[in-house]
Amino acid sequence: MLSYGSYTDGQEQPGTRWVYTVRASAMLRDFMGALRLKRGLERGVIAVQDAPAEVIGRCAVADPHEVEAALQGAARAAAQWSAAPLATRMRFVEIFHELVREKHDEIVDLMIAEGHPRSLARWETSGVLANTAPETVEFLAAQMEHRVVTAERELTVRRVADGVVCLNPPANATVANALLGVWALAAGNALVVRAPRSAPLGVMHILRELIAPALEAVGAPAGVLSVLCSDAPSTLAAWLQSPLVDDVMYFGGSRQGIEFGARCVAAGKKPILELAGNDICVVWHDADLDLAADALVEAFYGSGQICMVPNCAVVHPDVADELIAKVVERAARIRPGYPEEPDALLSPVLRTDLFRSVLEQALEGGAELVAGGRRLDVEGRPDEVGGLFLEPTVVRVDGLKGARDLEAVRHETFFPLLPIVVPAPGEGGDAGDLLQAVVEFVDTNEYGLRNSLWSGDRRVIDRFLAGVRGGGLLKVNDSHIGFLPVLPTHGGTGLTGGPGGEANYPLLRTSHLQGVSVARGVRPADAVFGDLTKGASA
């Protein structure tokens, strides 16, 4: 069994209260029995030495003193680490990348144990590798400093670390999102991570076994990394109140996140918000429909509980029927299962009541149920009483006008429900410009994580790219969720990133621009007045 205490100031702290992690497949086989086992261990009714193999690890629950100690250690380490050469900090990223490659299977297995289907765990790990690939490192390192040398001065525009960065990852993808902190460290910040009490083990393990060794390998000071499992409300409140905290990376729903961002600003902290996504995928009449259908069913991966999957499709009316048939055929092959199974892609959904409410509102609003809509058990059989999974569900919505009156179209739903919007005749206006109407529909989305397009016409592609300003990432004729080196994996506009939201490169978001001039033999009077007279009339 893995066991981790709070990690502060380079040392593990002894724990007195523990959160235990029971293997997800055991929870699916016997939820109540696994829950009794977990609670019995946490209450001390069951001795730790009597824990069965289904219990894979435990994490100590941090107390307020440890939360404060993490900030104190980070503040002491931040100045020293920010002064380390950029090459040293980039070398840290390179070592981390090598460790992820080396321990790839170990990372995947731990994600599976916490409930991620095997295929999705491999996808998440591929995102970590793309996010720290050599091409990405080279690109981001080049953003950190630009220097111009003249006869009299050395002029530099550089990015400087903000200081102490606190990161609060989401409960649904803890490991991959916590690892964004690698780039906050590379910027020269000290990092404090809160491992969610609902899923702390993967975060504790990966940060302790990959990030900490990589930092040690480059001689980073103790305290530059802290990770602890703690209660969210009290920890976030402590971060907001502490004068030692500079930035907070927050993951969560848009309403709560925007409110939290305002609290950060009021407290003098920089909020870096990773909130909901409500991505749109457009399929034009000249698209490769087989490939487009493959991309659209990514909406159902992880039961849609991934913020960057396509949440809505807009399909040209000339190909709508054919494409919908292809999507339905592929959706029928997406199945639930135990996370260890290689072909399982659906995850349990707790809020089945909300799914039913959103689906009924769409149908009452004129949408047509094309496929799905039922609760399923782990074997994929219909089970409307106790099923923990939802069948991939497709609804057709005719007309752009009024489509956003439906909750399923307007907001992120976070379950396997894909509305396919088919523009109605005449929606291109007097000029008959349907493409313009579709582009405007995409660009007026309140969210802005990712948007994508399928088309074989370069003119269509160019108009889409020119017209869609929202979103941290635009993809054309490609997987909607696939990761790529250099391009951002996170971040966006609108309700995705809040005011100031954009593509999130944490190296850049947790640092700030600074101009520097180093002069040689310059007379101050000439610097103030000299250039004003150059070229002036006698």
Image: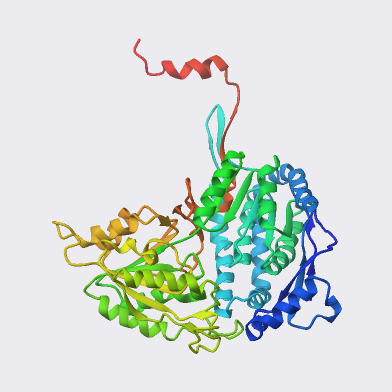
287 shown above or below 192: below
Q: How many marks?
A: 0
Q: Please tell me which residue is depicted at 37% across the width and 57% down the height of the picture.
A: 445
Q: Position of residue 241 (x, y in %)?
A: 68, 42
Which quadrant holds residue 215? Answer: bottom right
In front here: 511 or 216? Answer: 511
Where, quadrant-wise, is the C terminus in this rendering?
A: top left
Left of 168 or right of it: where is 475?
left
Left of 275 or right of it: where is 494?
left
In front here: 77 or 343? Answer: 343
Q: Position of residue 99 (x, y in %)?
A: 68, 68
Residue 475 shows in the view: no
Left of 490 or right of it: where is 268?
right
In front here: 284 or 114? Answer: 114
Residue 383 shows in the view: yes
145 shown above or below 301: above
Q: Residue furthest top?
A: 538
19 shown above or below 215: below
Where, quadrant-wise, is the N terminus in this rendering?
A: bottom right
Q: Please tell me which residue is depicted at 54% across the width and 89% down the height of the picture.
A: 379
132 shown above or below 105: above
Q: Position of residue 296 (x, y in %)?
A: 39, 74
Q: Please tell me which residue is depicted at 51% across the width and 17% down the height of the picture.
A: 528
Which quadrant holds residue 25? Answer: bottom right
